[in-house]
Amino acid sequence: MHRFEGKVVIVTGAGSGMGEATARRFSREGASVVLADYDRDSVERVASELPADRTMVQVVDVSSSGPVNAMVEATVSRFGKLDVIVNNAGVHESGEPEEITDERWRKVMSVDADGVFFGCRAAIPHLEKTGGSIINTASVSGTGGDWGMSPYNAAKGAVVNLTRALALDLGKKGIRVNSVCPSLTRTAMTEDMLEDGQLVARFKQRIPLGRVCEPDEVAAVIAFLASDDASFITGANIPVDGGVSASNGQPGQG
Ligand code: NAD
Ligand code: ADP
Ligand code: HBR
């Protein structure tokens, strides 16, 4: 499929995991892709495997608005417009609430919540011109609480409600705003969790499809939300969770 030929897409956090899978997916489907990440080596590695004439790297820390604004301006200057922004960069912190220092709280809120808002805001004038769309990477952790993840739950909850609020405000400009809400997915972020066999077994008990999500499965939903097939979807936080959110939380029988 070449659904995105002639389209210009920014993906943040494109150096690893879901962002990498998403950048590769849009590129395979014909888009010009701006791969943005804080980590230069990782994002340059991914970009080096994509067509040079329609790939650009931006080394940017999404937790500050200046660099995010510059990323969007550099995109429009090189490719002439912007059709899609995927605000995906994120970090994760876990621990009991008393262990969460001010610094750890600010790190998660500044990357996972501020970074998403800065990306959305910078893109608005350009997306208005193209009738484009925004996709944020939230999480099932934004639609309910987890044990020992309070800053992450707070930040992802902000992304879920920001997605709804911006859909209301931007509908009149013809801009759609949606998010994906993955459950445990095989990426660098969850490497430690996935090494703990007992923890993974407990996760699988709660996932009706009985397995961990792969980054490509999230990328596919992001691409759908950005495509014309999703032309009447806005303000939706789409679970990509193997059915985790179908449960009311009570235990299974087996
Ligand atoms: P990952 O660690 O593989 O990728 C995250 C990328 O974001 C990295 O390349 C990192 O360098 C980049 N990044 C981090 N902080 C940044 C910053 N300030 N500025 C720019 N780039 C920055 O992890 P992932 O699992 O692919 O995470 C992608 C998104 O998916 C995140 O928003 C994460 O919260 C979310 N998510 C992950 C899971 C999971 O189980 N892995 C589940 C639900 C949601
Ligand atoms: P986690 O605890 O989720 O594994 P890390 O602290 O290991 O997160 O960070 C993962 C990656 O996110 C790092 O390699 C770095 O590239 C990026 N990162 C972390 N904190 C920041 C930050 N404040 N600003 C920009 N990028 C950051
Ligand atoms: C565990 C999973 O929900 C995450 C890191 O978002």
Image (cartoon, grey):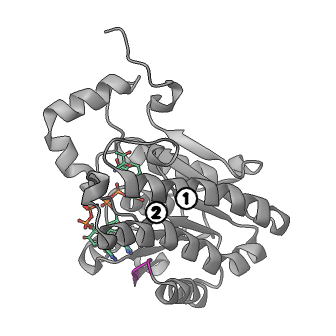
The image shows residue 252 at horizontal and vertical percentages of: 38, 14
Residue 226, quarter of the rendered image: bottom right
Residue 159's tag is: 1
Question: Tag 2: residue type?
Answer: Asn
Is residue 250 within the magenta segment? no
Where in the image, quadrant-wise, is ligand 2 located? bottom left
The image shows residue 43 at horizontal and vertical percentages of: 32, 74
Residue drawn at x 66%, y 47% is: 236
Residue drawn at x 30%, y 68% is: 104
**Left or right of 80, for residue 142:** left
Q: Main secondary structure of the magenta part?
A: loop
Task: Label 1: state its secondary structure.
Answer: helix
Residue behind mark 2: 88
Q: Determine if residue 1 is in view.
A: no
The reply to whether the residue tagged 2 has its Cβ within 8 angstroms of ligand 1 is: yes
Residue 131 vs residue 55, the one in the foreground: 131
Is residue 61 within the magenta segment? yes
Residue 120's tag is: none
**Stretch in magenta:** 58-63
Residue that lies at the very extreme toward the front in this rendered image: 98
**Left or right of 175, for residue 94:** left
